[in-house]
Structures are given as structure tokens and as C-alpha cells.
Amino acid sequence: MDYAIQSRFSDPGVHAGLFDALPDDVAGIAAVVRNLVIHYRGGGIEFTGEQLAEIDSRWVSAILDTDQKRNGTPLAVPREPVDRVVGCCRDYTLLFVAALRHKGIPARSRVGFADYFTEGFNNDHVVAEYWNSDRWVMIDAQLEPGTVPFEVADLPAGPFRSAAEVWLGYRAGELNGDLYGADANPEAPLKLHGGWFIRTYVHYQLAHLNGDELLLWDNWGSMSGTLDGADVEGTDRIARLMVAADNGDEAAAKEAEELYRTDPGLTFAGRSFVTSPAGRPPFAWVDLA
């Protein structure tokens, strides 16, 4: 895949011109993204109704639609937190990726888990990578520099781990799956951690790498809310391929891409079972076409 070209999700559509005025430096673009989005859980504001429903904006064009209707100013003009578009890590990352692609810089989203939000727990997270003409640089565009004890604009190995890495560690018995997810609460009505959750994120990682930068509550194909009867060996295979690709194995990268394009259990075909935290629609199939 050519990561310098917009995907159907990152394409800003009629708002492409807004990206022309953005800074040329990566840190400056990340700062603008933080000016546009506020996290629906971590932003210090309790959102409800129509504003909470903004978390279901799958496309950059839709996110920018909301911003421009609300603010109507260039993207770098400061917004009050309450006037930002409500989203999550995926939205910070996708906007950042879209802006870099607009400038011809190869960029992609990376799905996995971060250990720097909750002590003793690894939260589901999406960060970005961009090609700096020498290597893929990983950046957490959601975080202000200086808020964690490492460089957010060039994430070191360890604080963030890909879903594929975590899955293989879980399968090898090296990682406790209950320490990876969206919520560590074992008493919650829906258990949002554990092996099934990690497996789902391997599917998200594969989709995002292939230009389908879906919401973290879109569900399709062979995803499952349990490991009972799930094709865990198939997940082992794609996880191994993605880890090998990360280590420079081009043949593994091509094989993973081919699997995504041809295996109906892996390929996103335009129809999603949505389990949005906004409850709109409430756990329903949606045709994205």
C-alpha cells in the first residue's frame, strides 16, 4: 500500500484546502490536531447526546465537517475544549495521518496498547507512524510533549506495543491478557479486556495497515466476543506476519496484505456491527456504503 495516498477514511474531501495552511513540521501538525479533537472520556468534559455521537465519525471529511460548522475558522486557530470535535485516539491519529498524506509524507495508523495512561494496565490505543526518509517514526499525536517521561514524537520501544506483539505474548503465556483492554473493571457488564479483546485488536491493526482505518467499535468478519470457537490459529498467523513485517520482512508484509484482501473472515467489506460507546445505533449492523 502507498501510505502517501489518502484512504477512503483519511480523505478530507471538500476540506482538503484546510490542510494547505498547516505547518510543515510534524510537531506543529500534531499540535493542530490536538486543537481540533477532544477525547470523549479523557478530556475532562462529560459529553452526551449529539456531541457524544461525534465519536462515530469514521471519515476525516466528517470530522472536518463538524469542526467547520461549529468553528468555521482555519484549523490552527485555537478552539475552546468544548468546541472541539469529540473523538478518541483513533481520531487524533487519523487526522494527523491525513494531514501528513496531504503533504506527501507516508503515514499510517498503528493499533495496539499503551502502558502510560493507567498504572498497572495497558489501555487500547492508536498512534501514528510516518516515514522520515530513513525509518518509520512512531508518534502519539494525542499527547502534549512533556506529559510522559519519554519522547511522544518518537516513541521508544516498550510504552506502546502493537496488538500483534501483545497477542503473541498472550498466546505464549508471557502476558496476562486481563491487563490489556479498554477497561480493567472485572465487574463491568461487558468485560472489555482479555484474550478476545486483544484478538479483536489484531484485526483492527491489520485493517488499519491496509487503509481501512475503522472505528474501534466496528466489527466484521471473524471477530468474536469470545475465544470459544474463534480461529485463534489464523490470528496467530497474521500476528506473526505483521511482527515480521515490522522487522523489515517485505515478503511477510505482502502476505499479510494478500490475506486481508482475499480472506472474507479478515476483509472489511463495508458492513459493520457497531458497538459504539455512544449507543447510536445500539449494537446494530450498519451498511457503510
Image: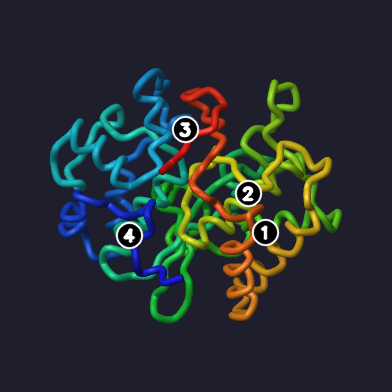
Label 4 residue SS? helix
Query: Mark 1–mark 2 contact, CB under 8 Å?
Result: no
Mark 2 near mark 4, Cβ–Cβ under 8 Å? no
Relative to 237, is 276 above or below?
above
> Residue placed at 53% from the left, 39% from the top?
272
Q: Mark 2 vs mark 4: which is more N-terminal?
A: 4
- Residue in the image at 67% along x and 59% along y: 164
Residue 230 pos. (x, y %): 78, 46
The one of 279 and 288 positioned closer to us in this rendering: 288
Q: Rate crowding at label 4 as few (under 14), some (14 to 19) or many (20 or more) other CA atoms within 10 Å.
A: some
The three-letter amino acid code for the residue at tag 2 is: Tyr
> Which disc is residue 201 wearing?
2
First along the sequence among labels 4 and 1:
4
Dot 3 or dot 4, earlier in sequence:
4
In front of the other: label 4 or label 1? 1
Looking at the rendered image, the disc whose residue lies closer to the viewer, 2 or 3, is 2
Observer-nearest of 202 and 286: 286
Badge 2 or badge 3: first in the primary sequence = 3
Q: CA distance from mark 4 to mark 1?
A: 27 Å
Mark number, residue 27: 4
Indicate the amino acid at tag 4.
Ala
Location of residue 246 in the rendering, given as x and y in whole percent from the top left corner: 60, 71
Disc number lying in front (1 or 3)? 1
Task: Give the spatial CA distance, label 2 vs label 4.
Answer: 27 Å
For the residues labelled 3 and 4, the Cα–Cα distance comes to 21 Å
Residue type highlighted by circle 1 = Ala
List the residue tagged with mark 3: 42
Identify residue for label 1: 164
